[in-house]
Amino acid sequence: MNHLGEIISLIVAVSWTFSAWFADKASRRIGSMETNVIRLVLATVFLSLLLWVTIGSPYPVHADGKAWLWLGLSALVGYVFGDYCLFNSYLVIGPRLGQLMMTIAPPMAAIAGWIMLGESMSWKSIVAMLVTLCGIGMSIMSRGEKHHIKLDIPFKGILLGIGAGTGQGVGLVLSKIGMEHYGAAVPAGAAGAMEAMLPFASTLIRAIVGAIGFIILLGLGKGLGSLKAAVKDPKGMKYATLLTIFGPALGVSLSLMAVRYANAGIASTLMALTPVLIIAPDVLVNKHKIKIKEILGVLVSVAGVAMFFLL
C-alpha cells in the first residue's frame, strides 16, 4: 500500500495528541519523573498481556542480543535521555519554547537515518518537511500572551531542548535498526505470527529498559518515596493509565511500525504534528480562543503534509 508508513505516522500524531493531554494532567498531579516511571511500567504490563494473547508469549520471544542491544540503546537515548532533557527544558525555558526546540527531531532523524541506514530524502520531501515544521513552529509560538522570542534564552535551556529533539530523532532510528535485527532473528516458521506484533514486542523491550533507566534516575535523586505516593493517587493513576495506552502502548508501537514502511525523517515529521492537533481539544475543553497565527500554522502544516502525499 502506497504511503502506508505516512498514514500510520499521522495516526501516531493523533495518538500522541491524547498522550500529551494526559501527560500534562498526570505530571501536574503526581510529578513528571514519577509519571515517566509509572507509564513505562504500565506499558510493560499492557504489552506483555497483548503479546501473551496474540502470540502466546508474554515476553519478546525470538529477540536476540543484537535486538536487545539496539532497542535498549534506543530506549536510553529516546526515553531516558530525550524525555529527561524535554521535561527539564520545560522548567528552564517553558513548555512553548521546549516544544519549539523539539522540531529539530525530524531533521535529526533524517540525518541519523542517512548516516546509520543509508536513507535519503528527495528535495521534494525536504521541502515538505520544512513547510510542515514551519507550520508547527507557527502554531506553537502563537500561544500565550507574548509572541516574541527573548534573546536572553538560558544556554542550559537551549542545550536541554537540543538534547530532547536529538534524543527523540536518533532514538527512532535506533529503534528501526533494532527492529531489523529482531525481524532477522525470528525463525521462518514464526515469521507470520510475529510480523504484525514485531513493533509491539520491540516497544516492550524499550519500555523495560526505559523503566529501569528512569527508576535509577529517580533513585539517584532520592525520589522513590514520591513514587510510592504517586501510585496511591487514584486520579493521578487514572491519567497515567490513559497516558500509557495512547503513549508507549499504542503510539510508540505504531511509530515503530511507521518507520518500517517510511523514511525515518518523513515519519518523524508527520508524528511531530501533535502541537498542531492538540489545538482542537484545547479549544473544546479549555475554551481556548484560537488565534489567526494558530490558524495559519495549521494551514501551513496541512499544506506540508499534503506535499508528502502529492509530490
Image (tube, helix red, strand yellow):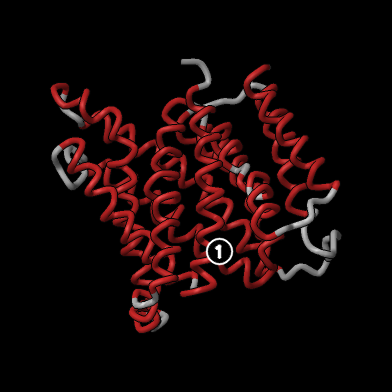
Residue beneath label 1, please? 24
Q: Position of residue 174 (x, y in %)?
A: 42, 42
- Quarter location, residue 106: top right
As displayed, is residue 79 above or below residue 154? above
Residue at left offset 49%, top offset 70%: 32
Residue located at (21% from left, 25% from top): 191
Dividing the picture into quarters, in which one does residue 50 lie? top left
Residue 290 location (% of width, % of height)? 79, 51
Residue toward you, 63 or 59: 59
Q: Residue at x 53, y 45 (%)?
A: 169
Categorize mark 1 by other alpha carbons within 10 Å: few (<14), some (14-19), many (20+).
some
Determine whether, in the image, residue 115 is placed left or right of residue 181: right
- Left or right of 285? Residue 295 is right
The answer to whether 78 is drawn above or below residue 183 in the figure is below
Three-letter amino acid code at the position of disc 1: Asp
Residue drawn 21% across the image and 36% down it: 54
